Image: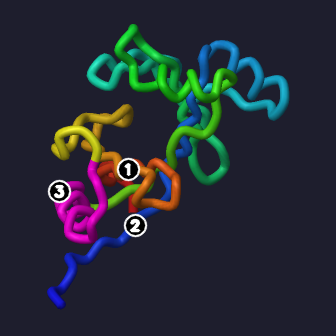
Amino acid sequence: MSQLPPLLLGRLNHVGIACPSIDDAVAMYGRLFGATVSTPAFDLPAQGVRVAFIDVANSQLELIEPLGADSPIHGFLKKNPNGGQHHVCFEVKDIIAARDAMRARGATVLGTGEPRMGAHGVPVIFVHPRDTGGVLIELMQEPDGHH
Protein backbone atom coordinates (compact mmCIF):
# COMPACT_ATOMS: atom_id res chain seq x y z
CA MET A 1 0.00 0.00 0.00
CA SER A 2 1.42 3.39 -0.97
CA GLN A 3 1.92 6.15 1.55
CA LEU A 4 -0.85 8.76 1.48
CA PRO A 5 0.20 12.41 1.55
CA PRO A 6 -0.29 13.98 4.98
CA LEU A 7 -3.23 16.31 5.53
CA LEU A 8 -3.85 18.11 8.76
CA LEU A 9 -6.99 20.17 9.12
CA GLY A 10 -6.46 23.54 10.68
CA ARG A 11 -9.05 25.52 12.56
CA LEU A 12 -12.70 25.70 11.62
CA ASN A 13 -12.86 28.97 9.71
CA HIS A 14 -16.58 29.27 9.08
CA VAL A 15 -19.90 27.58 8.51
CA GLY A 16 -21.52 28.57 5.22
CA ILE A 17 -25.26 29.23 5.34
CA ALA A 18 -27.19 29.61 2.10
CA CYS A 19 -30.02 32.09 2.26
CA PRO A 20 -32.46 33.58 -0.22
CA SER A 21 -31.71 37.07 1.20
CA ILE A 22 -28.62 38.16 3.14
CA ASP A 23 -30.53 41.19 4.44
CA ASP A 24 -33.28 38.97 5.87
CA ALA A 25 -30.73 36.55 7.37
CA VAL A 26 -28.77 39.41 8.98
CA ALA A 27 -31.99 40.77 10.48
CA MET A 28 -32.92 37.31 11.85
CA TYR A 29 -29.47 36.68 13.40
CA GLY A 30 -29.57 40.15 14.91
CA ARG A 31 -33.09 39.75 16.30
CA LEU A 32 -32.58 36.24 17.68
CA PHE A 33 -28.94 36.26 18.74
CA GLY A 34 -27.83 39.90 18.84
CA ALA A 35 -25.34 39.16 16.04
CA THR A 36 -23.94 41.90 13.85
CA VAL A 37 -22.24 41.74 10.49
CA SER A 38 -18.44 41.88 10.66
CA THR A 39 -17.92 41.95 6.87
CA PRO A 40 -20.73 43.66 4.95
CA ALA A 41 -22.19 41.89 1.91
CA PHE A 42 -20.08 41.89 -1.24
CA ASP A 43 -20.29 40.16 -4.59
CA LEU A 44 -18.04 37.25 -5.47
CA PRO A 45 -18.86 36.92 -9.19
CA ALA A 46 -16.32 34.13 -9.85
CA GLN A 47 -18.32 31.89 -7.50
CA GLY A 48 -21.76 33.27 -8.37
CA VAL A 49 -22.54 34.40 -4.84
CA ARG A 50 -22.97 37.43 -2.63
CA VAL A 51 -21.52 36.91 0.84
CA ALA A 52 -21.45 38.55 4.26
CA PHE A 53 -19.77 37.38 7.46
CA ILE A 54 -20.96 37.37 11.06
CA ASP A 55 -18.27 36.85 13.70
CA VAL A 56 -18.98 34.45 16.55
CA ALA A 57 -16.72 33.81 19.54
CA ASN A 58 -14.56 31.16 17.88
CA SER A 59 -15.41 31.28 14.17
CA GLN A 60 -17.63 32.96 11.59
CA LEU A 61 -20.92 32.41 9.82
CA GLU A 62 -20.73 33.03 6.08
CA LEU A 63 -24.10 34.06 4.69
CA ILE A 64 -24.36 33.16 1.00
CA GLU A 65 -26.98 34.50 -1.39
CA PRO A 66 -27.22 33.63 -5.10
CA LEU A 67 -25.70 36.18 -7.47
CA GLY A 68 -27.19 35.92 -10.93
CA ALA A 69 -29.04 33.13 -12.71
CA ASP A 70 -26.01 30.80 -12.89
CA SER A 71 -25.31 30.74 -9.14
CA PRO A 72 -24.66 27.26 -7.74
CA ILE A 73 -26.68 28.32 -4.68
CA HIS A 74 -29.93 28.23 -6.71
CA GLY A 75 -29.93 24.42 -6.71
CA PHE A 76 -29.44 24.32 -2.95
CA LEU A 77 -32.24 26.84 -2.36
CA LYS A 78 -34.55 24.93 -4.70
CA LYS A 79 -34.24 21.93 -2.35
CA ASN A 80 -34.14 24.14 0.78
CA PRO A 81 -36.28 27.24 0.03
CA ASN A 82 -35.64 28.81 3.45
CA GLY A 83 -31.89 28.24 3.17
CA GLY A 84 -29.73 26.26 5.56
CA GLN A 85 -26.26 24.98 6.29
CA HIS A 86 -24.41 24.79 2.98
CA HIS A 87 -20.81 23.89 3.90
CA VAL A 88 -18.18 23.73 6.61
CA CYS A 89 -14.80 25.36 5.96
CA PHE A 90 -11.48 24.30 7.47
CA GLU A 91 -8.12 25.98 7.04
CA VAL A 92 -5.14 24.09 5.64
CA LYS A 93 -1.51 25.19 5.46
CA ASP A 94 -1.07 24.34 1.77
CA ILE A 95 -4.10 24.23 -0.54
CA ILE A 96 -2.29 22.36 -3.33
CA ALA A 97 -1.05 19.70 -0.91
CA ALA A 98 -4.59 19.46 0.50
CA ARG A 99 -6.06 19.02 -2.98
CA ASP A 100 -3.52 16.34 -3.82
CA ALA A 101 -4.15 14.57 -0.52
CA MET A 102 -7.92 14.58 -1.15
CA ARG A 103 -7.43 13.07 -4.59
CA ALA A 104 -4.96 10.48 -3.28
CA ARG A 105 -7.55 9.44 -0.70
CA GLY A 106 -10.19 8.99 -3.41
CA ALA A 107 -12.24 12.12 -2.72
CA THR A 108 -13.71 14.22 -5.52
CA VAL A 109 -12.54 17.83 -5.66
CA LEU A 110 -15.32 19.85 -7.27
CA GLY A 111 -14.96 22.04 -10.35
CA THR A 112 -11.75 21.87 -12.31
CA GLY A 113 -9.84 20.84 -9.20
CA GLU A 114 -7.79 24.00 -9.42
CA PRO A 115 -8.11 26.23 -6.36
CA ARG A 116 -10.12 29.40 -6.85
CA MET A 117 -10.15 32.61 -4.87
CA GLY A 118 -12.53 32.46 -1.92
CA ALA A 119 -14.36 35.14 0.02
CA HIS A 120 -11.39 35.63 2.38
CA GLY A 121 -9.07 36.38 -0.55
CA VAL A 122 -7.21 33.06 -0.30
CA PRO A 123 -7.40 29.95 -2.52
CA VAL A 124 -10.11 27.38 -1.76
CA ILE A 125 -11.32 23.99 -2.96
CA PHE A 126 -14.52 22.08 -2.25
CA VAL A 127 -14.74 18.34 -1.57
CA HIS A 128 -17.86 16.52 -2.78
CA PRO A 129 -20.34 15.63 -0.01
CA ARG A 130 -20.68 12.03 -1.21
CA ASP A 131 -17.08 11.52 -0.03
CA THR A 132 -17.48 13.35 3.29
CA GLY A 133 -20.53 11.85 4.95
CA GLY A 134 -22.99 14.17 3.21
CA VAL A 135 -21.28 17.44 4.20
CA LEU A 136 -19.85 19.81 1.59
CA ILE A 137 -16.35 20.60 2.87
CA GLU A 138 -14.46 23.72 1.85
CA LEU A 139 -10.72 23.74 2.41
CA MET A 140 -9.08 27.14 2.39
CA GLN A 141 -5.47 28.23 2.44
CA GLU A 142 -4.68 29.48 5.92
CA PRO A 143 -4.91 33.29 5.82
CA ASP A 144 -1.81 35.29 6.73
CA GLY A 145 -1.62 35.92 10.45
CA HIS A 146 -3.49 32.77 11.53
CA HIS A 147 -1.76 30.12 13.64
Secondary structure state at the residue bearing disc 1: loop
Reading the image, the residue beneath label 3 is 96
Considering every residue shown, the one lying at the far top of the view is: 68
Reading the image, the residue beneath label 1 is 128
Reading the image, the residue beneath label 2 is 9
Image quadrant in which the C terminus is located: bottom left
Question: Magenta region's main secondary structure?
Answer: helix
Residue at (41% x, 64% y) in the render: 10
Residue at (62% x, 26% y) in the render: 37
Identify the amino acid type marked 2: Leu
Identify the amino acid type marked 1: His
C-beta proximity under 8 Å, tags 2 and 1 = no
Residue at (63% x, 28% y) in the render: 80
Q: Nearer the viewer, mark 1 or mark 3?
A: 1
Q: Which mark is residue 48?
A: none
Q: Which of the 4 image quarters holds residue 81?
A: top right
Q: Please provide the residue range marked out in magenta.
A: 94-109
Q: Is residue 26 above or below residue 122?
A: above
Is residue 98 located in the magenta-colored stretch of the structure?
A: yes
User: What is the C-alpha distance between the residues marked 1 and 3?
Assistant: 17 Å
Secondary structure state at the residue bearing disc 2: loop
Secondary structure state at the residue bearing disc 3: helix
Q: Compare residues 129 and 5 and report the one nearer the observer.
A: 129
Identify the amino acid type marked 3: Ile
Q: Nearer the viewer, mark 2 or mark 1?
A: 1
Q: Earlier in the sequence, mark 1 or mark 3?
A: 3
Q: Horizontal placement of 55 versus 144: left or right?
A: right
Image quadrant in which the N terminus is located: bottom left
Q: Which of the 4 image quarters holds residue 38?
A: top right
Please state the horizontal and vertical placement of residue 31, each as a whole percent of the image.
83, 23
